[in-house]
Image (tube, helix red, strand yellow):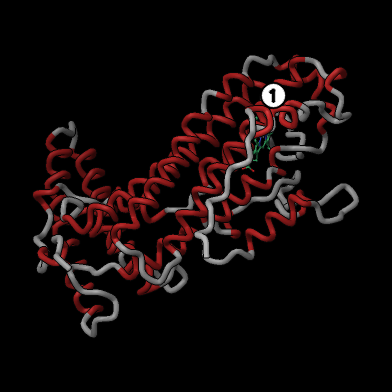
Amino acid sequence: MSAEQPKQPRPTNYWEYIRVDDLLSLQGGVDRDEAQVKNDEVLFIVVHQVYELWFKLVLRELRQARALFRQPRVAEQELSGAVRSLKRATTVLRASLPHWEVMETLTTRDFLAFRDKLFPASGFQSAQLRQIEIVLGLEESERIGLGASGEQGYLAALRAHDGAESTALRAVQKELEGGLSLKHAIDEWLHRTPIDGVDDKHPESARELDAFLAKFLEAHAAEGRRTCELACAAAYTEEERQALRGRYAREHESVRAFFQPSEAEGGTRRRRIRAAILLIESYRELPLLSWPREVIDALVEFEQLFVIFRQRHARMVERMIGRRTGTGGSAGVDYLDHTALKYRVFRDLWAVRSLQVRKDGLPALTQPDFYEFRNG
Ligand code: HEM
């Protein structure tokens, strides 16, 4: 039997492979006729299309990272792949930021010249942006609606004019049915992380977790006292010192509360997840924590860029149309600023930044050797 020959690739050329003709035939606007469309409008369409292409790449990379963390066990050596995906998605978002400047070559009046054609179309109907939010794990309860009184949700906005299902709506619905988000998959992974060498299956895991957190809270209180004294020494009046002491005391209380999440926040499960983030961030030099630390850094960096992307879009919009109502019917810039400020996914990863202490103020781990590289 002859060995199967590898399939010869079909010969191609640049325009067939890149589909240049297809790509260049997509800027005809509402009437699908480029001859009827002025340069300003072609620019408007192209910038949107470029962003949709970048969204496509971001979405693929986020799905890949999510698939990895959905596994019941994530091997250490696989984490670098997830970091690569997240970093690529971040690079795409970062590289896309100057594209808003291309949009800003339009003046307000240039835009108003063709804006009437757009109603009620809006970037609010970008299925891929919604898919990115869903893959990441944005809570549905955190979303705000679009309508004049905020009631129209993003799913309703994806219906066709006659109320029928659109392909955009189907894509988003499919994403919603797609199972565990990246955030939830990361939470599962963090929950399994051994805290001071003891994993969640160990009979003593709860006691060990309490001991780890108690030692940390003590270190945090000591750090707070030290910083508070420094701040008080630099204050001018006794009144200021009182205010500072109150502030530092409240800060420590909020750290205690962070590690006592309510049932609504996820109770003991959330407590363990938060402790795992603290462990990885605080003892990041230990060899077995080096890739987990890279994962956390990459997630925070991605979310930071996503927030900056939203803020940058909002500033471009403010410059272009001021504070008028959006074509989609939202409060325009106010709506966009709300999403930039409030739409956060990896809240605990951010929160742990407020409570970390200096390296030499950290308590020693009971089992630091657990996080050394092992043979076999
Ligand atoms: C002249 C240029 C633009 C203006 C004036 C503008 C304005 C707006 C406004 C006012 C909204 C809020 C929803 C509404 O009421 O319509 C919005 C949402 C949005 N726009 Fe733009 N936009 C512009 C360009 C772009 C471009 C180039 C993109 C790239 C994809 C984009 C993507 C989005 C997205 C994804 C949303 C939804 C944001 C969210 O719900 O969090 N926009 N835009």
Residue at screen point 80% across, 15% down: 38
**What's the residue at 76%, 39% (across, down)?**
328
User: Is residue 104 left or right of 67 when viewed as pictured?
Assistant: right
Point 21% across, 48% down: residue? 245
The image quadrant that residue 234 belongs to is: top left
Give the percent coordinates (x, y) of residue 201. 29, 80
* Type of amino acid under label 1: Ile
On screen, residue 223 above or below 111:
below
In percent of width and height, residue 339 lies at: 57, 43
In the drawing, does residue 364 fall left or right of residue 39?
left
Task: In this rendered view, identify the residue nearer to me: 43 or 191.
Answer: 43
Q: Nearer the viewer, residue 296 or 249?
A: 296
SS category of the residue bearing label 1: helix
Determine the quadrant in which ligand 1 lies.
top right
Residue holding disc 1: 321
Q: Position of residue 164 (x, y in %)?
A: 86, 55
Q: Quadrant of residue 122?
A: top right
Comparing 14 with 89, the one in front is 14
Q: Is residue 56 above or below residue 77?
A: above
Q: Nearer the viewer, residue 202 or 229?
A: 202
Residue at image point 75% right, 44% down: 148
| Image quadrant occupied by the C terminus | bottom left
Residue pushed farthest bottom?
A: 203
Instruction: Estimate the x, y position of residue 222 in percent, counting from the top left.
Output: 12, 54
Query: Mark 1 near ligand 1 (CB under 8 Å)?
Result: yes
Note whether residue 234 is visible. yes
